[in-house]
Each structure stands twice: as structure tokens, then as C-alpha cells.
Image: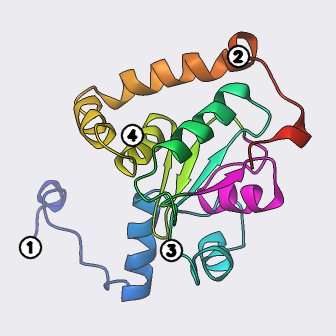
């Protein structure tokens, strides 16, 4: 007979393993690609065909009216390793495609607070997006990204948030019709 106090230390009966499809979905969620809470649409599946079937290059989402962000897009385009066939695609956060990709990344479709890099299997936000974008650029930017990854994420994101919160005050806004893309 098992003592009730000993029952606390017995292992719980093992649950049946989830099918492989569910396990992949969990991995994708932990990698940063997931549907927003309360959403019944699988935005990853809904956008895979539209955005990644014929072109697997990552997509950089940026604030189309932010002068700093537009300058960032110009900088990335000018430092892209392969100028004839760019390694990164671009989309304004405010566009319909941008909103779909934000949903795919588990973000609110009206959230224009951060640059987002969307790859086929993963999305990056804030400082992680900036560092991942740097990895696609000409030298010395991939090495700089490696160096900055040594800085803890919470510090990188704190700096990122301070710049993002003040970007309009410092760099100004542009007319939505003059968006870099």
C-alpha cells in the first residue's frame, strides 16, 4: 500500500506523445512564429504560400513613415551583399502585407513599434531583428552582429526601445506616399 505522503514523489503517469505535426507547431512557436492569442487563423500557413512559395528571402518590416526606418532601409539596400538579386525583401508595417506578416509573427497588426524580420520559419523583433539583418549585409556587419550578441538581450532591447520611442521626435516623420518602398 502506498503512503499518501509518498504519492507526491511518484512520477505522474506519462501522457501520450503529441503527433509530429503538433510538435513542429510548438517548435515554430518557440522560434517566434505563432498566431496571436485568440486568433483562429493559422497565419503561418495562411501566409507561407503568399510570401514564401516562390521567394524564400526574408522580409524586413519597417515603419514606412519613420525617417530613421526609411534611412535604415536605404542603408540595408546599399550594403546588401548581392545588389543584383537582393538578399532581403522590404515591406512597410502599415501595408496590408505588412499587417499579415505581423500577425504571422505573433504581433498585433497595428503594432508599428518595432522592425521585424520575417523568415520562412521564424520571425525576429527589436534588437534581434536588427542583428539578424546585419548578418545579411556586407562585411564588417556580420562580425559586428556577432559582437553585439554578446550584450544581453534585455540591454539591447532597452536601448532599442529608447530609440524607437523617440524616433519621430529626433528623426521626424515623412509623408506616407514617400515611403522608401
- First in residue order: circle 3 vs circle 2: 3
Nearest to viewer (mark 2 / mark 4): 2
Mark 1 neighbour class, 10 Å CA radius: few under 14, some 14 to 19, many 20 or more: few
- The residue where tag 4 is placed is 131
Read off the magenta span.
89-111
Rendering coords of residue 170 (x, y %): 69, 11
| Circle number at residue 56 | 3
Disc 2 to disc 4: CB gap under 8 Å: no
The question of residue 98 being in magenta is answered with yes
- Mark 3–mark 2 Cα distance, whole angstroms, equals 32 Å
- First in residue order: circle 2 vs circle 4: 4
- First in residue order: circle 1 vs circle 2: 1
- First in residue order: circle 4 vs circle 3: 3
- Mark 4–mark 3 Cα distance, whole angstroms, equals 19 Å
Disc 4 to disc 3: CB gap under 8 Å: no
Disc 3 to disc 1: CB gap under 8 Å: no
- Mark 2–mark 4 Cα distance, whole angstroms, equals 21 Å
The part of the image, by quadrant, that contains residue 153 is top left
Nearest to viewer (mark 3 / mark 1): 3
- Mark 1–mark 4 Cα distance, whole angstroms, equals 59 Å
- The residue where tag 2 is placed is 171
Foreground of the two, 166 or 44: 166
Rendering coords of residue 76 (x, y %): 52, 43
Quarter of the picture containing the N terminus is: bottom left
- Kind of element beneath mark 2: helix
- The residue where tag 1 is placed is 1
- First in residue order: circle 3 vs circle 1: 1
Mark 2 neighbour class, 10 Å CA radius: few under 14, some 14 to 19, many 20 or more: few
Q: Is residue 159 above or below residue 110?
A: above
Amino acid at each position: 500500500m502506498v503512503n499518501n505522503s509518498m504519492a507526491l514523489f511518484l512520477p505522474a503517469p506519462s501522457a501520450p506523445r503529441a503527433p509530429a505535426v503538433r510538435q513542429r507547431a510548438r517548435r515554430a512557436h518557440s522560434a517566434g512564429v505563432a498566431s496571436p492569442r485568440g486568433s483562429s487563423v493559422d497565419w503561418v500557413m495562411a501566409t507561407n504560400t503568399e510570401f514564401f512559395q516562390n521567394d524564400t528571402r526574408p522580409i524586413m518590416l519597417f515603419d514606412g513613415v519613420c525617417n530613421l526606418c526609411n534611412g535604415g532601409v536605404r542603408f540595408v539596400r546599399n550594403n546588401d551583399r548581392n545588389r543584383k538579386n537582393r538578399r532581403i525583401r522590404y515591406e512597410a508595417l502599415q501595408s496590408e502585407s505588412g499587417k499579415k506578416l505581423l500577425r504571422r509573427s505573433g504581433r498585433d497588426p497595428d503594432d508599428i513599434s518595432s522592425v521585424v524580420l520575417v523568415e520562412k520559419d521564424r520571425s525576429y523583433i527589436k534588437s534581434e531583428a536588427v542583428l539578424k539583418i546585419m548578418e545579411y549585409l556586407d562585411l564588417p556587419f556580420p562580425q559586428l552582429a556577432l559582437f553585439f550578441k554578446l550584450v544581453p538581450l534585455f540591454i539591447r532591447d532597452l536601448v532599442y526601445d529608447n530609440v524607437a520611442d523617440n524616433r519621430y521626435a529626433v528623426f521626424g516623420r515623412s509623408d506616407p506616399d514617400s515611403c522608401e518602398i
